[in-house]
Amino acid sequence: MRATYAPGLFAGKTVAVTGGGTGIGLFTARRFAELGASISICGRRAEVLEAAARDVEAAGRAAGHDTRVVWRAADTKQPETLAAWRDATLEQLRGVDVLLCNAGANFLAPAASITPNGFATVVGTVLNGTWNTLHCWFPHLSERGEAVIILNAGTNGFTSSALMAHSGAGKAGMLNLTQTLAVEWAGVGIRVNAIAPGPVDTEGANARLWADPEARKRVTRHVPLGRMGTPEDCANGMLFLCSPAASFITGATLVVDGGNCLKQLPELL
């Protein structure tokens, strides 16, 4: 038990993160660096990634590690940019042991008002982008042995997704991929799991989904534990699924939502 999150747990390992410049991706990259991992991050905005890389490197070095960080601008909807990120990562860090598919997109809208282009954009990032990432990295991970893949999905992948039909459809596909690939890729030593966050307090989500303080209060009222999730909550779930404590877990989805997706107590109580 003491070794599960021991200092240096991921020393000698490399973690690659899509959407690693902000939010959950950045926080998780920082936590892996603090536990000794080298990190490679990608995202669409070079200036954000450059700052994030400095942040992650500083976190690792503050924890006493000689942290190396690689970053490259890439769009998960464009496989050629993912390939360039992969190649740069392998050239500088030699290998990747953990792949975190974290890139996402979302906006609030009634289903009837979501245009085909809007639907395709969100699903293209959430589901197609995840597939592009997995397809890009599989040849390397299959040769690596004992690799781990984590998909950052969401509870709206297995519940209704009112006002976020595009996101719900994409997340449902991610949850199915988690189970399918866990079966297909176990033979080459790859474990595939997912986390399913509920409402999480990040800069991006706050701007797109609950910018209104009253909306935040309404969301929080439906969380039995009485608060929104944090990037740290999500990072802790990913760290567990990548740790030795989870070595016999694959095809699973770890719900990180404070009970939000559960049926609530009847109002009469």
Image (cartoon, helix red, strand yellow):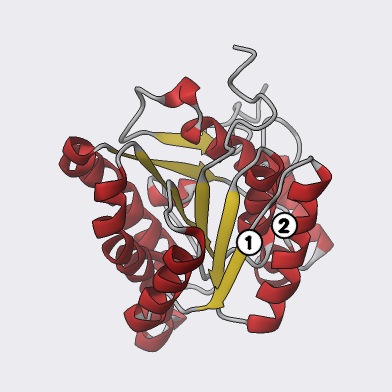
> Three-letter amino acid code at disc 2?
Val
Kindly identify the residue that appears in the image at 63 percent across and 49 percent down.
Answer: 28
Check disc 1 and report the residue beneath it.
Answer: 69
**As drawn, 188 above or below 205:** above
> Three-letter amino acid code at disc 1?
Val
The quarter holding residue 54 reads bottom right
What label does residue 185 carry, if any? none
Kindly identify the residue that appears in the image at 73 percent across and 45 percent down.
Answer: 220
Q: Position of residue 122 (x, y in %)?
A: 44, 74
Kindly identify the residue that appears in the image at 43 percent across and 46 percent down.
Answer: 97
- Asked if residue 181 lies left or right of residue 127, the reply is left
Kindly identify the residue that appears in the image at 55 percent across and 45 percent down.
Answer: 197
Can residue 11 be seen by looking at this rendering? yes
Check disc 2 and report the residue beneath it.
Answer: 56
Can residue 152 be seen by looking at this rendering? no
The quarter holding residue 48 reads bottom right
Report the Cα–Cα distance between label 2 and label 1.
7 Å
Q: Position of residue 172 (x, y in %)?
A: 34, 53
Q: Nearer the viewer, residue 98 or 159?
A: 98
Residue that extends furthest to the top in the rendered view of this protein: 1
Q: Position of residue 192 (x, y in %)?
A: 33, 41
Q: Nearer the viewer, residue 50 or 192?
A: 50
